[in-house]
Image (cartoon, rainbow, N blue to C red):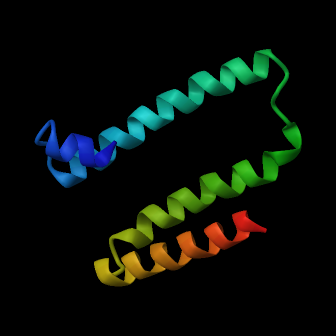
Amino acid sequence: LVPSFIYLLKMDEYSSRGTSILVIFIFCIINLIIYWKTFYFDISILPIIIGSIIGTFVGMKLVYKINKNVLSIIFAVFTIIMGIGMIR
């Protein structure tokens, strides 16, 4: 979404990120309601959900204190590790 907002709609980077997060949030809420009503929601992942919420707030505070290059490296390493984990 972010590249589309930047290049097609000529939004600045920060606005495109915020708008992208809002779109994803709305999509997630709608899907949560649908899955909850059809009983495809497993409540056993509640600790992961709580950890994700806490991690989001911590990440929001840290992202402005970390150098962009360091943040890019961290994201790249994380993406590689997740990709390797998916291959197994």
User: Compared with residue 54, is residue 45 higher up or lower down, i.e. above or below?
Assistant: above
Q: Nearer the viewer, residue 50 or 88?
A: 88
Q: Nearer the viewer, residue 86 or 61?
A: 86
Residue occupying image coordinates x 42% and y 81%: 73
Report the residue that reaches farthest toward the top.
37
Left or right: 47 with respect to 73? right
Residue occupying image coordinates x 37% and y 84%: 70
User: Compared with residue 71, is residue 83 higher up or lower down, i.e. above or below?
Assistant: above
Which quadrant is the N terminus positioned in? top left
Residue occupying image coordinates x 80% and y 53%: 47
Q: How many marks?
A: 0
Quarter of the image for residue 10 reads top left
Which quadrant is the C terminus positioned in? bottom right
Residue occupying image coordinates x 80% and y 46%: 46
Q: Nearer the viewer, residue 56 or 2?
A: 2
| Residue 61 position within the rendered picture, expressed as x and y whole percent measured from the top left | 42, 67
Report the residue that reaches farthest toward the left.
10
Report the residue that reaches farthest toward the right.
44
| Residue 59 position within the rendered picture, expressed as x and y whole percent measured from the top left | 49, 65
Left or right: 20 with respect to 12? right
Quarter of the image for residue 48 reads bottom right
Left or right: 11 with respect to 2? left
| Residue 54 position within the rendered picture, expressed as x and y whole percent measured from the top left | 62, 58
